[in-house]
Image (spheres, rainbow, N blue to C red):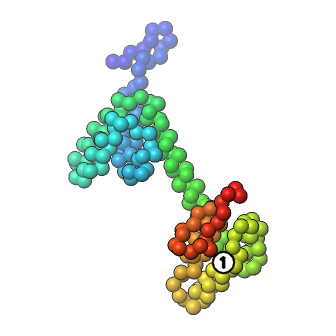
Amino acid sequence: MRGRDEETGEFHSPSRSEQRREALGVLDLAETLAGLTDAQLARVPVPESITPHILDTRRITSNIARKRQLAFLAKQMRKLDDEELQAMRDALDEKSESSRAEVAAMHRVEAWRTKLLDGGDAALAELLDLHPDADRQRLRQLVRNALDERNRNKPPRAFRELFRELRGVMLGTHDDEGDDSLDVDDTDD
């Protein structure tokens, strides 16, 4: 039994419910770690003693055996310090925040693409005011081609190219497919 302190009346240790909640939290963390790819796992500060257990858990496909291995992984993780567990949780939370930021950036690019297709030259002038390093001719040509594709019910090739070009202009990334006109000088930032 856990007992109480005679002087303060506080409990000496956490209740069984608190211990169970903590254990289930570690189990959830273990399940999340087992679901990560190698690249994602490399960004999380996982102790070397835990990595082989994570790899074993990934390898197992049978439901019951995987559940048992996951419980074993969580048991090994409960032996870690609270700081180590919190560092792993923080790294995973940071990852989710960065993915939300990436999604928001893609939505901004999509909004500009729609604005360019619907707004014409005024929208292009506004974009060029915000991003003077953008290639005016290339953007104008892609907008014209995307509108032509839309009117002729053709596959959206220029529509996608316009998105890639806008992403490169707004976020500083380009998918180089051998086209030198897509290069942007990022040294001005």
Residue that protrudes farthest toward the top in the picture: 7
The structure residue drawn at horizontal position 43% and vertical position 35%, both measured from the top left corner, is 85
Q: Position of residue 186 (x, y in %)?
A: 66, 60
**Going by the image, does 128 lie left or right of 161?**
right
Name the residue carrying label 1.
138
Residue sitting nearer the eye, 147 or 6: 147
In which image quadrant can residue 11 be found?
top left
Residue sitting nearer the eye, 39 or 121: 39
Asked if residue 117 can be seen in this view, the reply is no
**Going by the image, does 139 lie left or right of 85?**
right
Q: Position of residue 13 (x, y in %)?
A: 41, 20
Residue 70 lies, with reference to residue 115, above or below; the image says: above
In which image quadrant can residue 140 be found?
bottom right
The structure residue drawn at horizontal position 74% and vertical position 67%, both measured from the top left corner, is 132
The structure residue drawn at horizontal position 40% and vertical position 25%, both measured from the top left corner, is 15
Q: Position of residue 23 (x, y in %)?
A: 37, 35
Q: How many marks?
A: 1
Callout 1: 10 Å neighbours few (<14), some, many (20+)? some
In which image quadrant can residue 185 be found?
bottom right
Residue 95 lies, with reference to residue 126, above or below; the image says: above
The structure residue drawn at horizontal position 49% and vertical position 43%, both measured from the top left corner, is 91
Q: Position of residue 86 (x, y in %)?
A: 47, 35
Residue sitting nearer the eye, 42 or 22: 42
Q: Quadrant of the N terminus?
A: top left
Asked if residue 52 can be seen in this view, the reply is yes
Q: Quadrant of the C terminus?
A: bottom right
**Amino acid, disc 1:** Arg
Residue sitting nearer the eye, 128 or 57: 128
